[in-house]
Amino acid sequence: MVSRLSDYLRKLERRGVLPQEERDALLSLPARERVFDDEEIAIKEGQPSLEAMFLVDGVVSRQRKLDGHRQIIFFCLQGDAVDLQSIWFHRADHSIVSHGTSRAVFVRHADLYDLFREYPTLAMVLWHDTLVDASILRDWNLNVGHRRARPRIAHLFLEFEARLNAIGAYDGGLRLPMSQKTLADALGLSLVHFNKSLAILRSDGLLKLTGRRFEILDRARLTKLAQFNPDYLHLRAPPKLIPQPESEPL
Amino acid sequence: MVSRLSDYLRKLERRGVLPQEERDALLSLPARERVFDDEEIAIKEGQPSLEAMFLVDGVVSRQRKLDGHRQIIFFCLQGDAVDLQSIWFHRADHSIVSHGTSRAVFVRHADLYDLFREYPTLAMVLWHDTLVDASILRDWNLNVGHRRARPRIAHLFLEFEARLNAIGAYDGGLRLPMSQKTLADALGLSLVHFNKSLAILRSDGLLKLTGRRFEILDRARLTKLAQFNPDYLHLRAPPKLIPQPESEPL
DNA sequence: CGCCTGCTTGACCTCGCTCAAGGCCCGTGG
DNA sequence: CCACGGGCCTTGAGCGAGGTCAAGCAGGCG
């Protein structure tokens, strides 16, 4: 039986291969699996955090409530550590919600602490991963703080494309399992304005959408419009202590 | 001679005291000091990161450029780790700029790695600190994404007040060593609109400003306006592995 | 004294929000 | 099978927040 942490390991190893011993240690961590329905709350703001959640399949978001509204802070895709950032916190400081059906595994923090004691390098690698997270957060700040609606939307799509590409899940289009309201919440836009801006992007021939499947038609113009530079995603950048891989892992 | 890392240690210990041995190890790290002028760039986006910067005195910001504009991602105050998040990265992914004169110490990453090898708990404590950072980033996202100009401004001031209070640097008012343009850049507002919104906050009797010194006149109404809840700052929340302090360190 | 930088204010216009209604798709029940 | 209802997407109209341009003003400094 293959541990479902293998997706996460694969993500980590895109940045640099790990020693066999540490890969094995990671994969042999006890993990329980859970499936979530659309809009189901996986982790609720304020609840004690005792386990770390890793996404195996689907999409979940990190979000917080303000008044009646919600702000979506981040979208996690297959293979992402969902709430690794809560590992040293007593309580979750935001909620995790599923979009569409998703599948995740949970690993007890206590087991991770043991792992770190034994393999300090793994702690560094996971620390690095949480820092990449923070880097993306900084970029989202830039995005909502300084970009107008259209470039802001374009930026989100290009980020999705880049991240899906990295995990080999981009087949020329992206199927997003969430409503436009949800995307608008992530961008700090109203649903109506999001929809209208999207309509302009479409009529400009920049992207196409059929149902909830999006296709990027003109990446060059879209990239220019959004001033998109994928460096902040650190998709392949290895942490300092991990040697560069000799050859690309598949 | 007192190491200038003592400010940072004090910040960490507000969340939980450290064993004597580890405090000593932290304080005896070799550190070089530097002073920066107003608007001087301490660390430039893209430059190799070999040292970690800790702010001893003054204010610096993390920022990124977009087109001609700049987005300010975060303000660091006395005692903050400025770019700890770059510890596992090869290059700085954003710039650090001084506001007013500031003083900082630099510790080589290599020395920190040695420290972590010897005292793994310290690695966890610093990791935790970078996660608090990320928590604040999430809140800034919420702030620029979902709050209108006035509550957004109010929120920033309340954050400043809370953080200055925590380090005992709040004397009933806050002197911010940066121009209103800089604050506007942090909030994703234009200078003009920032200034006008600020004028309304003042005429409403919520705050007062003389020169660059701000005074909070009506904290209750300001807190309500901004929906401010300081939990995200994790000012006193200890990381999981550190025991609660028996008594408050001074 | 004059200049430069930063704060302030006015005028104007655009972007984006709100309210509202209509259309499409799909699931459910008659 | 169709009728109905409920999400969700789409579009229109109107308004208000916030951006841009521009001018005046106050303080610091050579």
Image: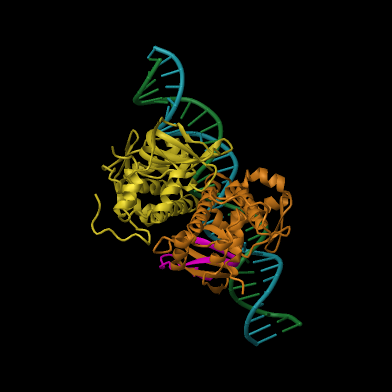
Chain colours: A orange, B yellow, C cyan, D green
Asked whether residue A189 is in view, the answer is no
The answer to which of A99 and D6 lies nearer the viewer is: A99
- Percent from the top left, x then y, of residue A35? 57, 74
Look at the image and give the residue range highlighted in magenta. Answer: A40-63
Number of numbered tags placed on the structure image: 0
- Percent from the top left, x then y, of residue D5? 60, 76
Location of residue D6 with respect to B200 vertically, above or below: below
Asked whether residue B117 is in view, the answer is yes
Q: Is residue A224 left or right of residue B65?
A: right
Q: Is residue B198 left or right of residue B141?
A: left
Look at the image and say whether residue A49 sits in the magenta stretch. Answer: yes
Q: Is residue A193 left or right of residue B186?
A: right
Which quadrant would the N terminus of chain B be assigned to in this image? Answer: top left
Location of residue B149 with respect to C6 vertically, above or below: below
Q: Is residue A95 left or right of residue B227?
A: right
Residue B57 found in image quarter: top left
Residue A103 found in image quarter: bottom right
Look at the image and say whether residue B187 sits in the magenta stretch. Answer: no
For image coordinates 40% across by 52% down, the residue present is: B118
Location of residue B216 with respect to A199 vertically, above or below: above
Q: Main secondary structure of the magenta part?
A: strand
For image coordinates 31% across by 54% down, the residue present is: B18
- Percent from the top left, x then y, of residue A164? 65, 58
- Percent from the top left, x then y, of residue B106? 41, 38
